[in-house]
């Protein structure tokens, strides 16, 4: 598996191109991501969103139009793709496949597992491919996603943190913003964040 990374837009949202056996998966194409994706990919078979916030889905529609690739997004965040709830002027898009909770998909012969961790948004998920987690805005290096947006939930975030703390395997973690880490390293900080979320 080859992974290309490029921070996009003023939020510096990490856009990823994952290449396996000559097939490309684009994860979280944010602001002005389309040209970079097209320059750095050869056979895009899907566009994958970890959640519906504008800085992760901005280039969905343009990439689908230019490449014809289907869009996969969490069902709980489908409304964000079309309604621009944070009023950022996001180009509207529509998912071809709505992922419902924890779901394992076969995309062009590549196993893609969505793990649902709501809290930051209703549909917030990580995308697991082999031994890598693309964690969107759920887990970052030494931090977690915000839980104070209009569609966020502190209660759901607490449940998600408890859920992720029980996972025994380790994964390389590529977040929606900032540098990479590992799940085991970030599990060490979860008690701190769980306490912070429960105080709200």
Image (cartoon, rainbow, N blue to C red):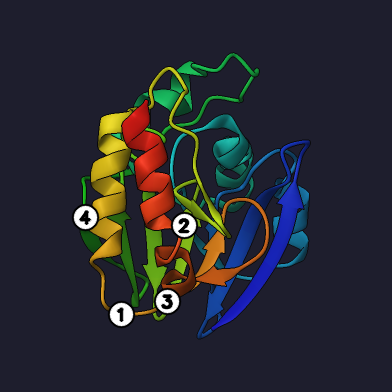
Secondary structure of residue under mark 3:
loop
The mark closer to the camera, 2 or 1, is: 1
Decide: few, some or many residues near mark 4? Use Cα within 10 Å; few <14, some 14-19, many ≥20: some
Residue beneath disc 3: 171
Residue 146 appears in view:
yes
In the drawing, does residue 79 fall left or right of residue 2? Answer: left
In the drawing, does residue 143 fall left or right of residue 71? Answer: right
Secondary structure of residue under mark 1:
loop
User: Residue 195: x, y in percent?
Assistant: 36, 42
Determine which of the numbered discs, if any, sits on residue 169 in the image: 1
As displayed, is residue 148 above or below residue 68?
A: above
Decide: few, some or many residues near mark 3? Use Cα within 10 Å; few <14, some 14-19, many ≥20: some
Residue beneath disc 4: 102
Q: Earlier in the sequence, mark 3 or mark 2?
A: 2
Residue beneath disc 2: 135
Residues at discs 2 and 1 in contact (Cβ within 8 Å): no
Give the CA distance from mark 3 to mark 1: 7 Å
Give the CA distance from mark 4 to mark 2: 14 Å
């Amino acid at each position: 598996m080859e992974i290309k990374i490029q921070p996009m837009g003023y939020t510096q949202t990490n856009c990823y191109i994952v290449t396996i056996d000559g097939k490309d998966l684009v994860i979280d194409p944010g602001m002005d991501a389309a040209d970079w994706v097209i320059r750095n990919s050869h056979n895009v078979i899907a566009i994958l969103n970890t959640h519906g916030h504008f800085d992760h889905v901005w280039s969905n529609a343009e990439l689908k139009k230019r490449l014809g690739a289907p869009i996969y997004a969490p069902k709980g965040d489908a409304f964000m793709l079309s309604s621009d709830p944070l009023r950022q002027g996001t180009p509207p898009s529509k998912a071809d496949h709505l992922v419902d909770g924890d779901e394992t998909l076969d995309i062009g012969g590549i196993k893609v597992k969505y793990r649902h961790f709501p809290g930051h948004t209703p549909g917030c998920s990580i995308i697991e491919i082999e031994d890598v987690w693309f964690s969107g805005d759920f887990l970052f290096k030494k931090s977690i996603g915000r839980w104070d947006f209009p569609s966020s939930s502190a209660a759901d975030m607490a449940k998600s943190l408890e859920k992720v703390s029980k996972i025994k395997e380790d994964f390389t973690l590529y977040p929606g913003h900032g540098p990479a880490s590992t799940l085991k390293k970030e599990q060490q900080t979860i008690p701190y964040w769980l306490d912070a979320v429960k105080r709200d």
